[in-house]
Amino acid sequence: MKLTLHTKETAPEESQAVIDEVINAYGFFPNLYAMMAAAPMAPRTYLDLNAILDKTSLSDTEVQIVLIATSYENECTYCVAAHTVVAGMKKVPNDIVQALRDGTQIADPKLEALRALTASIVQTRGRPTPKILKAFADAGYMQAQLIEVLIGVATKTFTNYLNHISDTPLDEVFKTAEWKKETKT
């Protein structure tokens, strides 16, 4: 099945209001949303999930760690590139973003515990080891943050999988952050 990359003009009428909201929020109509537009509830769901993530107790940096680490583990070239740009806009330190793009440890132990938990959740399909969970708790995170991480993983898994199925083309604004997972030998 070939999925349609909609434009504002070709998207279903039911998607028009959310498309306008997306354009107002981002200043353009990202290809990810253009793929979602075929199902009017999809772009609305994604906007709402992102708004929920903005209201969690996680900092902007921590949210981007969850989103990029999930995308890294799922090998989503579109989302790693897009969130690299978003992370820059949110002032996430470059060394953190580079570690996430490389799949390596973050120097800050607390943020590394968050990255490791996120990676483990994705790798184990929601069954991180007691050791990973203990490191997360020892870093100062609580049950609430664990649940917030799961919201982030769910949000990104949705878009990662859509991008895999649709082979979403990378928007021009994200091309400077193009990414492909390095294969380790």
Image (spheres, helix red, strand yellow):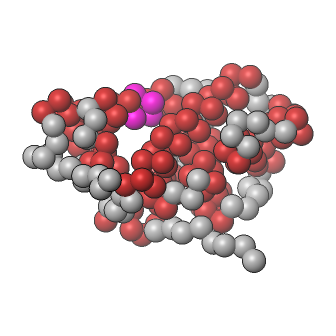
Near-viewer residue (57 or 122):
122
Query: As drawn, is 34 to the left or to the right of 75?
Result: left
Q: Quadrant of residue 137?
A: top right
Q: Residue furthest front?
A: 1
Q: Residue at x 74, y 22 (%)?
A: 143
Percent position of residue 1, x then y: 32, 53
Near-viewer residue (162 or 136):
162
Q: Can residue 100 be spotted in the picture?
A: yes
**Residue 33 sits above or below residue 183 on the image:** above
**Residue 165 sits above or below residue 19 on the image:** below
Near-viewer residue (166 or 56):
166
Q: Is residue 49 magenta?
A: yes
Percent position of residue 10, x then y: 12, 46
Query: As drawn, is 108 to the left or to the right of 100?
Result: right
Q: Which residues are magenta?
A: 46-50
Q: How many marks?
A: 0
Q: Can residue 84 be spotted in the picture?
A: no
**Residue 182 sits above or below residue 77 on the image:** below
Q: Residue furthest bottom?
A: 185
Percent position of residue 69, x then y: 63, 51
Q: Residue at x 12, y 33 (%)?
A: 13
Q: Residue at x 32, y 36 (%)?
A: 43
Percent position of residue 95, x then y: 65, 62
Q: Residue at x 16, y 42 (%)?
A: 11
Q: Is residue 74 magenta?
A: no
Q: Residue furthest top?
A: 144
Q: Residue furthest left?
A: 9
Q: Quadrant of the C terminus?
A: bottom right
Q: Magenta-highlighted stretch: main secondary structure? A: helix
